[in-house]
Image (spheres, helix red, strand yellow):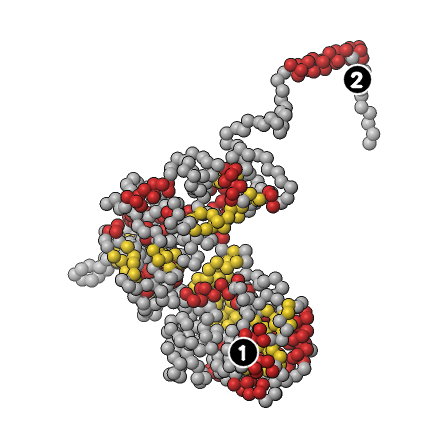
Amino acid sequence: MSSAPAKPADLVTVNIDGKEIAVPKGTNVIEAAKLVGVEIPHYCYHPKLTIVGNCRMCLIEMGMPAVDPATKAPVMDPATGKQKVNWIPRPQIGCGTNASPGLHIRTNSPMVKDCREGVTEMLLINHPLDCPICDQAGECKLQEHSTAYGRGYSRFVEQKNVKPKRTELGPRVTLDDERCILCSRCIRFSKEIAKDDVLGFIDRGSYSTLTCYPGRKLENNYSLNTVDICPVGALTSTDFRFKMRVWFLKQTPGIDPESSVGANTEVWSREGVIYRITPRQNDAVNDTWMSDSGRMLYKQVKAADRLLAPMIDGLATAPEMALKAANDLLKAGSVAIVGSGRSSVEEQFLTKKLAEALKVPASLVSRVGQGDRLLISSDRNPNVRGALVTGLISALPTQQLTSLASDIDAGKVKTVLSVGEDLTAAGLAAAQLAKVSVVFLGTHKNATSDAAKVVVPTLTIFEKSGSFVNQQFRLQKFAKAVPGPAGVADDLITLSNLVSFASRIITPADLGGLWSSIAAEVKPLAGLSHALLPATGHVLDASAWADLPVCEGETLHYKPAAVPAAVNA
Amino acid sequence: MAYTVERKPLTLLERIYIPQILAGMRVTLKHLFAPNVTMQYPEERPAIPSGYRGVPTLVMDPHGREKCVSCQLCEFVCPPKAIRITPGEIPPDAPTGHVEKAPKAFDIDMLRCIYCGLCQEVCPEEAIFLQNQYSMTGYTRAEMVNDKARLYELGGTLPDQHFKWDKKKAAAEHGNAH
């Protein structure tokens, strides 16, 4: 507008319901309206997917400032003294309308209200009255918008449409066809984000059905994101289906520990039981997506092979006895410490303190898998960079503990402390483990815990709070979603006990106290604290590690600095 | 501060006491012939007025179908958190497979229940009713928790206005109408 103040070239001023706002050029009307606090209801539009404009729920009235066709001079309205606005007589879709200079939008006019009522009625005509048995109830956009923008009564007296109720689109996704409102978000997600174009609509009118291409299945590792973005209860997670209503579930922010991407997650639990894991939006890490494999990780909490009691020589014992036995073994000397890239920054800091107190070096085990270029990188440890930052290790870890193996063979090591790492998987033979006393801190049974002299059970990522440093050197925190099993102490308490005994200095075991030591002692983490860390994380200065030969290839929001080694996907 | 209460001296009639005795005898005689207001509980039971809010129960429809679909709205609305439901899935090949969902477990803790009737009010399937049962006793706390089997035993069958799910099944068997 002519009266608007000077502004950067990429901002345009639009007028939404009488409120003016400057938005970047190309912003669509839904996003612009969100900035002024106006909700434009929509189903098919998703900020991370292409725009198709097929649900018609976001219809708005649009107008442009009037100019004289011949002279291009602004036409002024004598009543107000401002430039006249020419309103388009028909409604336009908000998602497909981009901000242009002087654009005027009305989202609360009688025509817009009428449009929304019409679209809602049209969608509800063949939508079943399934809400009592529908898992989406409580987080259903159709439910919310019908209440907010619907007519409130039904004129439909004919027989409702009938469609299949339980189509298995893939191993993890079940489709309830009657509930589908044909928004095509799932189709676009599969095509554009998962790059696995398996979904499509067949038939016409009320026979339209979502289906997979013949002979194909929705079985990629990102299939459950279609369930998240489904605005109604059509796509349901086979795992979560009919398990619990969402309004009972408590949300706790988490981090996907599968790989160094560190996708942000939301852990949904009720009364100490986790029911599902969904992505948490972080536009710098995972947008609004996460992998299916990361969603199933909560099953490890109640796994049958979970370590639940401290053990000495395979026999259950009291926690104090196990800790005492561990302390005695560590005090005896000739110790080797195997830290973990799965431990949190706090645990790695304590592991480093323990290594310093015992004056032994610590090693880490690298885990390498195939990266999928999206949200699973080839580095399958979530926190190797945390170990670099805290100083637990100074070079990238190897997959095999060859130097530890030769030290054991040479008789230089008598005790091995493993912080959750399976030493057999890391290349130590059973005979080598038999030569040494193993102290194992871990969550689940494995060959190392079987061979260990002392086993102290620890907590899974869902039962403790902490932080990880992901591949972008972004420090991200996760919180305790459910309490740990009875009798299992927090990892920080176990580790700080070992550190306190070895160093004869009381070490804090709580996050607040620990972070004051971390901020004071670890230079890259100076001035930070777990409590004040923002939900989207904090990017650390990574210049010290810029030329490390990391193994990761490209992922959604990460590009490796140099061409990495051959392990890339 | 002490003060004196003036007492009126008794009149002659009050002093001879006979009118008071006669008035008392009149009341006694009246009740001797009046109908009883008490009841020989537990042999005799009172008539329960309609709309009475007794023990919450689960009901079946006239075809013997379990009406609850475990939507858990009663569990949500229950002020003292007396209701606890574990949802479950009905296998597709069961006669009521089209309903898809039914409670695996349904417990109402009668030590917590306050008989408010909100569960009945909120139920979208008309499956839970506070009926005439008013006396719940037990020797242990566990006995005072009504499980699913007991709730259906207490609830029995009530008439249905809608047969919503039967209509749905009929529509599915009929196929698309257009």
From the image, state whether disc 1 or disc 2 is nearer to you: 1
Q: Which mark is residue A423?
A: 1
Q: Where A103 sits versus B13, above or below?
A: below
Which SS class for mark 2?
loop
Secondary structure of residue under mark 1: loop
Identify the residue at horizontal 40%, vertical 71% (top origin).
A375
Seen from the viewer's position, the closer of residues B29 and A66 is B29
Visible residue check, residue A317: yes
Q: Residue at x 63, y 25 (%)?
A: B40
Tell me which amino acid carries mark 1.
Leu
Per the rendering, the mark at residue B8 is 2
- Asked whether, in this view, residue A528 is left or right of residue A203, the answer is right
Instruction: Give the quadrant of residue A281.
Output: bottom left
Judged from this view, the residue extending furthest toward the front is A431
Of the 4 image quadrants, the one containing the C terminus of chain B is top left
Tally the numbered discs.
2
Q: x, y (%) of residue A259?
A: 45, 73
Q: Residues within 10 Å of mark 1 (few under 14, many from 20)?
A: many
Q: CA distance from mark 1 to mark 2?
A: 104 Å
Q: Would you place residue A476 above or below residue A157 in this image?
A: below
The image position of residue A219, as x and y in percent, is: 35, 65
Q: Nearer the viewer, residue A291 or A5?
A: A291
Residue at image location 50% in from the left, 84% down from the top: A395
Q: Chain of mark 2?
A: B
Left or right: A38 as drawn, with respect to A496 = left
Q: Chain of mark 1?
A: A
**Residue lying farthest left?**
A70
